[in-house]
């Protein structure tokens, strides 16, 4: 799907949930890439545990779409990459461990803020399901923050790469977290989510201490809204096809069983 | 009956782990409200299957409906004293 509205586009609230679910699913894949090859066996296992959480959260979010008449199986297993609503920062694989740390600090944190926003709204299914997800996210945050500090304090190549990854991820992720479009404004007016300004502020408050460690002023970073597509709830591009093939389980399609 | 259904990873009753939030049986229909320790628990399907298998062994139960619930979120506080004892024997603190 490219820009413009199509009759088959999901309504704004379904797109919002899809955006959270797809981002979690792709983030899980990006974490799982580092089960092997992380700086230590323990960190690889932590990456695996986080991947498992992200996929569990994605599953619960996709199943919420049943309320909007969607078949969760189709949503999870039939869509092409161009119909994914995931955060652009995850479109390509994370190239090194500093990239994983940046993704935990920036994208996973943005997801946490977005989930908290959704659970604070009037959608009952979110109110009942998201607290468990947020409880599981606490581990991600403490793990990511500890690694962020470790790399920033160490200086040298580790810090340099961390700065580079954070700098690349922040602008598009801030745009994804706090859209300034009519669809998001509609959700806010219906009491389903917090305002874009509020979620941005909550993100900045949580991230400022880490950003400061690499000399970034979180609140001063401008979101990159170039090419924003309201119907896909993200900027240009799409997750790499290889990741989506894995997300859909293409190679094992013949083995799916009830 | 559900005390006989074990968590496949820990071999402890799902009742002692505090995974069952509610039960109701009416006219042969059993309704179970079930949660899991984690949103991506790898044993979800096995546990559901074991619950169904156990309940359907009773001649007076014809149908089993399992509702997945997440509110309130499961924490270790839900483990019973017997469950804690069993975990301790396995070398797991809770």
Image (tube, rainbow, N blue to C red):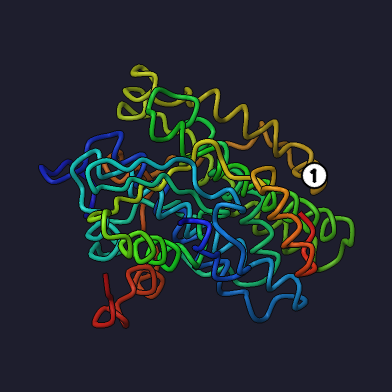
**Residue A181 position in % (x across, y down):** 35, 29
Q: Residue at x 64, y 44 (%)?
A: B78
**Residue A251 position in % (x across, y down):** 31, 82
Q: Residue furthest left?
A: A7
Numbered-mark total: 1
Q: Residue at x 86, y 66 (%)?
A: A156
Label 1, on which residue? A215
Q: Residue furthest front?
A: B59
B77 over A202 or under it: above or below? below
To which quarter of the image does residue B94 belong? bottom right
Q: Residue at x 49, y 49 (%)?
A: B35
Check disc 1 and report its element: helix, strand or loop.
loop
Q: Is residue B64 shown left or right of residue B41? A: left
Q: Nearer the viewer, residue B46 or A26?
A: B46
A243 over A151 or under it: above or below? below
**Residue A177 position in % (x across, y down):** 49, 38
Q: Is residue B80 shown left or right of residue A120? A: right
Q: Residue at x 85, y 59 (%)?
A: A150
Quarter placement of the N terminus of chain B: bottom left
For mark 1, does the 10 Å Cα neighbourhood hold few (<14), some (14 to 19), or many (20 or more) residues?
A: few
**Residue A71 position in % (x across, y down):** 21, 53
**Chain of the residue on which disc 1 is drawn:** A
């Amino acid at each position: 799907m490219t820009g413009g509205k199509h009759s088959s586009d999901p309504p704004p609230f379904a797109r919002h949930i899809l955006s959270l679910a797809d981002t979690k699913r792709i983030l899980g894949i990006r974490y799982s890439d580092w089960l092997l090859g992380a700086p230590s066996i323990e960190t690889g296992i932590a990456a695996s545990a986080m991947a498992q959480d992200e996929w569990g959260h994605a599953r619960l979010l996709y199943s919420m779409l049943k309320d909007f008449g969607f078949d969760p199986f189709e949503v999870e297993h039939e869509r092409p990459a161009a119909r994914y609503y995931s955060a652009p920062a995850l479109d390509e694989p994370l190239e090194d461990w500093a990239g994983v740390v940046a993704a935990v600090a920036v994208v996973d944190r943005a997801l946490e803020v977005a989930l908290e926003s959704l659970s604070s709204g009037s959608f009952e299914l979110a109110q009942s399901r998201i607290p468990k997800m947020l409880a599981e996210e606490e581990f991600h945050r403490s793990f990511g923050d500890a690694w962020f500090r470790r790399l920033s304090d160490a200086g040298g190549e580790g810090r340099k790469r961390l700065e580079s990854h954070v700098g690349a991820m922040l602008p598009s992720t801030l745009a994804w977290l706090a859209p300034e479009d009519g669809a998001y404004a509609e959700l806010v007016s219906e009491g389903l989510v917090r305002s874009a300004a509020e979620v941005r502020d909550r993100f900045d408050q949580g991230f400022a201490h880490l950003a400061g460690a690499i000399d970034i002023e979180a609140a001063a970073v401008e979101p990159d809204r170039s090419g924003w597509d309201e119907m896909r709830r993200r900027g240009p591009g799409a997750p790499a096809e290889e990741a989506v093939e894995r997300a859909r389980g293409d190679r094992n399609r013949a083995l799916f069983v009830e | 009956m559900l005390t006989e259904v074990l968590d496949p990873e820990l071999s402890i009753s799902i009742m002692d782990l505090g995974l069952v939030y509610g039960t109701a049986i009416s006219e042969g229909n059993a309704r179970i409200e079930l949660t899991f320790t984690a949103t991506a628990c790898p044993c979800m399907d096995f546990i559901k299957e074991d619950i169904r298998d156990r309940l359907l062994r009773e001649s007076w139960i014809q149908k089993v409906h399992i509702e997945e619930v997440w509110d309130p979120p499961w924490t270790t506080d839900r483990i019973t004293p017997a469950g804690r004892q069993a975990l301790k024997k396995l070398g797991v603190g809770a």
